[in-house]
Amino acid sequence: MGGDTVDAVPIGAWFGKGKRTGRFGNFLLAIYNEDSEEYQTLCKIGTGFSDQQLEDCYNSLNEIKVDRKPQYYDVDTDKFNPDVWFEANQVWEIKAADLSISPAHTAARGLVDAAKGISLRFPRLVRVRDDKTAEQSTSPEQVRDLYVAQDSVKGVPKNDDVEEEY
């Protein structure tokens, strides 16, 4: 994924364990599909948070909890059923190692693979974006473009895949 980041929306969370007890430990992130007017799941994230960020996220997201998953959330609840659902209200800038085809996530479904979406591998939080609304999150088309632009998808070997000649 290089230096690229994705702007995603936290739509659900699971309660943490260990030092994260009493807070959220993992979050379900989504992007907004303007055509279908739905939020499509992109990844689960639980890394890249300082203790203060986890506390801040817990406090701000707790204010926008909803009783059940909104109908406009395109989520496979057999695979992802968070302890808590949120209104689509915040935008988080996320950096990841790369993007991959996902049978579980729904982001950009049908744009690369007819039945599968695209997910972020090893996502981590960069920052909360106060300058964007949830509808301004990264689009499915932008996720597809980031996926197909990867060297591994284009078939270009990465530097560590190239054998040196002696």
Image (cartoon, rainbow, N blue to C red):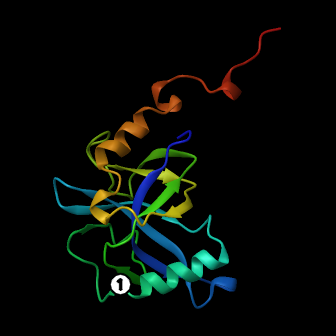
Q: Position of residue 28 (x, y in %)?
A: 43, 69
Q: Is residue 107 left or right of residue 159?
A: left
Q: Quadrant of residue 158?
A: top right
Q: Which residue is mark 1?
A: 64
Q: Position of residue 67 (x, y in %)?
A: 30, 89
Q: Quadrant of residue 53?
A: bottom right
Residue 111 drawn above or below residue 52: above
Q: Nearer the viewer, residue 86 or 126?
A: 126
Q: Secondary structure at mark 1?
A: loop
Residue found at the far front of this picture: 131
- Above/below status of 29 relative to 151: below
* Residue drawn at 50 percent across, 43 percent down: 4
Residue ID at (50%, 56%): 94
| Residue at the top extreme, as displayed | 166
Q: Which amino acid type is marked by label 1? A: Ile
What residue appears at the point 34 percent right and 57 percent down from the top-left corner?
Answer: 137
Q: Quadrant of residue 61?
A: bottom left
Q: Residues within 10 Å of mark 1 (few under 14, many from 20)?
A: some
* Relative height, residue 87 to residue 43 (above, below): below
> In the image, what residue occupies the spot 48% across and 52% down?
120
Across and down, in percent, residue 153 comes to 47, 31
Q: Residue 48: where, in percent of width, then height?
A: 62, 64
